[in-house]
Amino acid sequence: MRTRDDILSELLELKANPPKSFSGSIAKTQKKNSLIQELCRVENTILQPTSDSEHQNVQFGDFEINIKITKK
């Protein structure tokens, strides 16, 4: 299983290399969406809530994600 850093570096590569055609743009969007889904899966395994409500701050690079997890 890939780590969060691997996924983030691949997302940065996609951002740094713009597509050269419309079909390339579609393929890049699909790849980006799959990477974001994989990142969410990785983050969810890392952020297993221990209480009914838990607030988590995750920081990588220049980004900070604030996540609040609440059990129903």
Image (cartoon, helix red, strand yellow):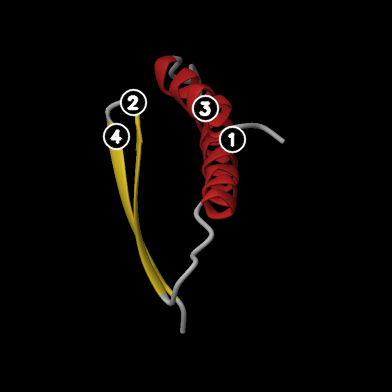
In this view, the residue in front, 27 or 62, is 62
**Residue drawn where x is 54% and y is 49% of the image:** 46
Pointer 3 residue: 5
- Of mark 4 and mark 1, the one earlier in the sequence is 1
The image shows residue 1 at horizontal and vertical percentages of 72, 36
> Where is residue 10, by image quadrant?
top right
Left/right placement of residue 61 relative to residue 1 reads left
Q: Is residue 26 depicted above or below 16 in this figure?
A: below
> Where is residue 12, by image quadrant?
top left
**Residue drawn where x is 29% and y is 34% of the image:** 63
Q: Amino acid under label 2? A: Gly
> What is the spatial separation of the Cα atoms under label 3 and label 1, in whole angstroms?
16 Å
**Residue drawn where x is 49% and y is 64% of the image:** 49
- Of mark 3 and mark 4, the one earlier in the sequence is 3
> What is the spatial separation of the Cα atoms under label 3 and label 4, in whole angstroms?
13 Å
Furthest residue to the right?
Answer: 1
Pointer 2 residue: 61
> Where is residue 34, by image quadrant?
top right
Q: Is residue 13 depicted above or below 54 in this figure?
A: above
> What is the spatial separation of the Cα atoms under label 2 and label 4, in whole angstroms?
6 Å
Which circle marks residue 31 in the picture? 1
Pointer 4 residue: 63
Q: Nearer the viewer, mark 1 or mark 2?
A: 2
Q: Amino acid under label 1? A: Lys
**Contact (Cβ within 8 Å) of mark 2 with mark 4:** yes
Label 1 crowd (10 A; few <14 / some 14-19 / many >=20): some
> What is the spatial separation of the Cα atoms under label 4 and label 1, in whole angstroms?
20 Å
**Contact (Cβ within 8 Å) of mark 2 with mark 3:** no
Q: Is residue 40 depicted above or below 23 in this figure?
A: below
Q: In what element is the residue under mark 1? A: helix
- Of mark 3 and mark 1, the one earlier in the sequence is 3
In this view, the residue in front, 50 or 55, is 50
